[in-house]
Image (spheres, helix red, strand yellow):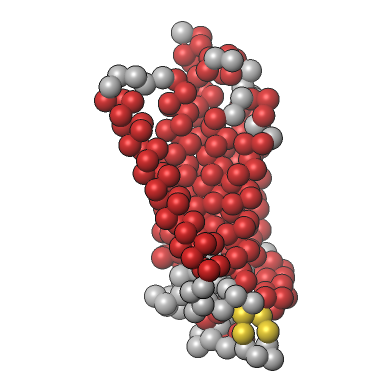
Amino acid sequence: MTDLAWGRHASPAPSHAAEVVICLAVIGLMVLWPSVHRFDMMLEPVFFDAGHTRWLLPPGDRGWHFLVAYKGLKIAFGVAGGALAVFLLFRAATRRWRAFDTRVLAALCVFVLTPLIVGLLKKLTGVSCPVQETIFGGPYPHVAIWDRLFAAASYNTHLRCWPAGHASAGFGLMGLRLLAPAAQRLGIYWLPGLAAGWSMGLYQMARGQHYLSHTIVTMMLAILLSSLAVAIRDRMTVRVDRG
């Protein structure tokens, strides 16, 4: 099926609007609903042995799981993204650019922008990680995004844990939605991003680096970015089709 044919059968704009609204609503709930933070505090002790003051996967452990699930994945994603960027530059420089390359470029933008935006939010928000908090044997009091928004806690440069950063690279694979035909928008093209993002997010939760809500917010940001990218791509494709 050609690129233009995909555009003719693209989902109507309201479906993209609905995705955007849902993403923003979930992020709003994660930020503003106090029950979310209470649930985080109930769930995180599953990964923490209070008797031995030890996390399921100790943050200082640099064993095989760290090399595979943290360092290794970062290197793999970085190499893959860099290689894809070089390939697209080669296609453009040699005038071999095709319509599908534009889709790949859009997917790469989602993959890159997701961790960049999450990293910026982590730097600006000043929210604590579970491992840093006194309730889990750390040196700082618990600071949620709720506390920062309503000035209940002052900014601390040592607290940079909202939303989930490591998982953002995995959820950035939601950009693969840009490669999907319209009929498969909610199908297999979602799976790599969801699988990678949640694997990386749960790994960090087991190390005391994030609460569940941190990871959910990162997922919704990735879906939001991919939804906006798909909407822009479809609008541009329909315009070209109409000529």
Q: Position of residue 117 (x, y in %)?
A: 44, 53
Q: Position of residue 184 (x, y in %)?
A: 67, 29
Q: Position of residue 208 (x, y in %)?
A: 58, 75
Q: What is the quadrant of the N terminus in the image? A: top right
The answer to whether residue 141 of the structure is visible from this angle is no
Q: Is residue 126 above or below residue 188?
A: below
Q: How many marks?
A: 0
Residue depicted at 63% across the width and 50% down the height: 195
Residue 120 in which image quadrant: bottom left
Residue extending furthest toward the bottom: 51
Residue depicted at 68% across the width and 25% down the height: 183
Q: Who is closer to the viewer here, 54 or 102?
A: 54
- Is residue 144 rendered to the left or right of residue 34? left
- Is residue 150 rendered to the left or right of residue 41? left
Q: Position of residue 209 (x, y in %)?
A: 55, 71
Q: Is residue 182 above or below residue 218?
A: above
The answer to whether residue 52 of the structure is visible from this angle is yes
